[in-house]
Image: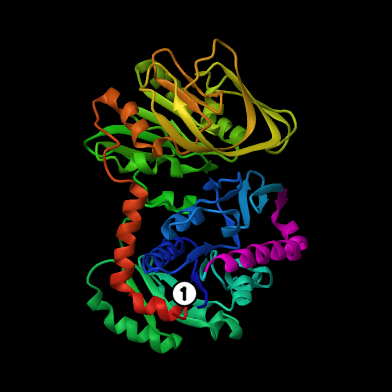
């Protein structure tokens, strides 16, 4: 058996979802398969059982394979921060921050770290399905391209190139990418996938012939434009999210912060049929029933933006008018009285007043808490249900008044809830994934929530069906040498 690498003509063509679908089909056919992405740049992250941090997309792909996510599946994770720099995470642990220019001096070290993880995975699984990053033919960056070129070469992986037809220009993007691939990589290119096709695919038959003639490789499949309800890898996907409420349902708003992170926390809530979730960059004219401030990779920067953009005034006004407000991780820090960063963890030393809705002060520090958690709701305003999730955050939050914890885990209290139950804060990511917690939260609006299928499992099942129908098991077997 061999390995396969799923590359794309650009970011957001669907590589992550296609990779998850291929892995799902192979796993269901009894293949010992796992995902691998040498280097990922994303603000959606997940925590492995041993407390390592990886891209959420690789966690999703591990679930597609029916295996536990590990740091080797994404050995290098870059998390963009304000100031054109990124936090560098290697084998799940923070190694510091770096500007783009400084990565050139770390190429050898990063490549060795990626190869180390690849070799461990290769010993544990028969097939690795590797995901590329962005475009494989950024000509000024190809020398150090770990995800698209260097690690697939090391693995001698068969290459598949994905193009997005919905954006237009699929002929130019696929053909241009094939022509710009180095000869040694082009020789391993086994086929193309046309993604996000709308309408009757029979009308594209002539186009398929043209693509195959131009690129001299077969089109392995044309995938329809569908929503699988699965999390996307980066914030580019938010451009396609609804920014206004539907005519029916609970009106819920997500504040789309400039450095929004882990917006995967909202996936299950978005799937609730009686909830209309809007992703909003500016305050809506009407008051939402529920407002969520998600995580951030630049808490002080985004907190200042809340005041500059008018969100702060709107949120405090809506609080007085009865809106329920939830802050998750950085969102909870912003709901407090103040956020201090005397060490300049997020840039220059700074301090900024918070929204003042939670009696707490947060002090940023260089230690990062990354841990999976099993928790229990202890707030009397909610049903005492169990929840699972994970912490990923810098900073310690001190509550100034009598503690009113939302959760408890491992003997420690977490978060805060107001006496009327309408302001909630927590460091726990993934809390809203739990059907029992959504049920107790949304019951206050008379919504019978949390009863449906797990949205990720349902999405993977739907995705598996699409890959089986439009690509086929035999094609995938040939791709990985079965």
Helix, strand or loop for the magenta stretch, by majority: helix
- Residue 287 appears in view: no
The residue at 63%/43% (across/down) is 82
Q: Which residue is mark 1?
A: 161
> Is 429 in front, or is 41?
429
**In-front residue for pair 223/115:** 115
Q: Is residue 112 magenta?
A: yes
Which of the 4 image quarters holds residue 81? top right
Determine whether 79 is above or below 167 in the image. above
Given residues 204 and 401, the one toward you in this image is 401
Taking the magenta stretch, the answer to whether it contains residue 465 is no
Where is residue 311 shown, x and y percent of the image? Answer: 46, 29
Q: Residue at x 21, y 36 (%)?
A: 248
x and y percentages locating residue 165 in the rendered image: 36, 69
Q: Is residue 67 visible?
A: yes
Write down the region rendered in magenta: 96-125
Q: Residue at x 29, y 23 (%)?
A: 444
> Quick check: 482 left or right of 244?
right
Q: Position of residue 136 (x, y in %)?
A: 56, 71
Instruction: Name the spot of residue 422 as percent of width and height, x first.
Output: 39, 20
In the current view of this chain or complex, which residue is farthest to the right? 105
Residue at image location 54% in from the left, 14% down from the top: 403
Q: Quadrant of the C terminus?
A: bottom left
């Amino acid at each position: 058996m061999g390995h396969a690498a799923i590359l794309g003509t650009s970011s957001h063509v669907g590589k992550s979802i296609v990779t998850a679908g291929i892995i799902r089909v192979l796993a269901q056919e009894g293949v010992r398969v796992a995902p691998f992405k040498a280097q990922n740049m994303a603000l959606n992250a997940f925590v492995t059982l041993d407390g390592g941090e990886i891209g959420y997309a690789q966690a999703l792909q591990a679930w597609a394979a029916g295996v536990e996510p590990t740091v080797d599946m994404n050995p290098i994770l870059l998390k963009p921060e304000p100031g054109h720099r990124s936090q560098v995470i290697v084998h799940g642990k923070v190694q510091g921050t770096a500007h783009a220019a400084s990565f050139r001096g770390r190429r050898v070290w990063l490549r060795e770290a990626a190869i180390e993880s690849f070799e461990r995975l290769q010993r544990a699984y028969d097939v690795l399905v590797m995901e590329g990053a962005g475009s494989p033919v950024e000509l000024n960056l190809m020398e150090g391209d770990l995800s698209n070129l260097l690690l697939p070469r090391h693995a001698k992986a068969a290459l598949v190139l994905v193009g997005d037809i919905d954006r237009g220009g699929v002929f130019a993007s696929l053909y241009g990418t094939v022509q710009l691939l180095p000869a040694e990589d082009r020789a391993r290119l086994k086929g193309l996938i046309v993604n996000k096709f709308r309408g009757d695919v029979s009308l594209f038959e002539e186009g398929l012939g043209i693509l195959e003639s131009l690129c001299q490789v077969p089109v392995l499949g044309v995938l329809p434009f569908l929503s699988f309800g699965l999390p996307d890898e980066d914030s580019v996907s938010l451009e396609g999210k609804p920014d206004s409420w539907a005519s029916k349902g609970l009106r819920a708003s997500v504040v789309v912060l400039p450095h929004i992170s882990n917006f995967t926390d909202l996936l299950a809530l978005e799937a609730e049929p009686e909830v209309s979730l809007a992703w909003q960059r500016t305050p809506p004219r009407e008051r939402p029933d529920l407002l969520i401030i998600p995580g951030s990779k630049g808490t002080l920067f985004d907190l200042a933006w809340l005041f500059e953009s008018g969100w702060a005034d709107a949120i405090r006004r809506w609080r007085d008018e009865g809106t329920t407000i939830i802050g998750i991780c950085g969102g909870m820090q912003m709901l407090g009285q103040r956020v201090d960063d005397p060490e300049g963890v997020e840039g220059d030393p700074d301090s900024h007043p918070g929204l003042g809705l939670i009696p707490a002060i947060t002090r940023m520090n260089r230690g990062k808490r990354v841990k999976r958690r099993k928790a229990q709701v202890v707030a009397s305003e909610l049903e005492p249900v169990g929840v699972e999730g994970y912490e990923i955050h810098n900073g310690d939050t001190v509550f100034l008044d009598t503690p009113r914890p939302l959760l408890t885990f491992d003997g420690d209290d977490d978060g805060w809830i107001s006496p009327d139950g309408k302001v909630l804060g927590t460091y726990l990511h993934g809390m809203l994934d739990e059907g029992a917690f959504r049920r107790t939260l949304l019951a206050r609006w008379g919504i019978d929530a949390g009863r449906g299928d797990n949205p990720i499992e349902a999405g993977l099942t739907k995705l598996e069906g699409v890959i089986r129908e439009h690509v086929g098991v035999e094609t995938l077997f040939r791709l990985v040498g079965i």
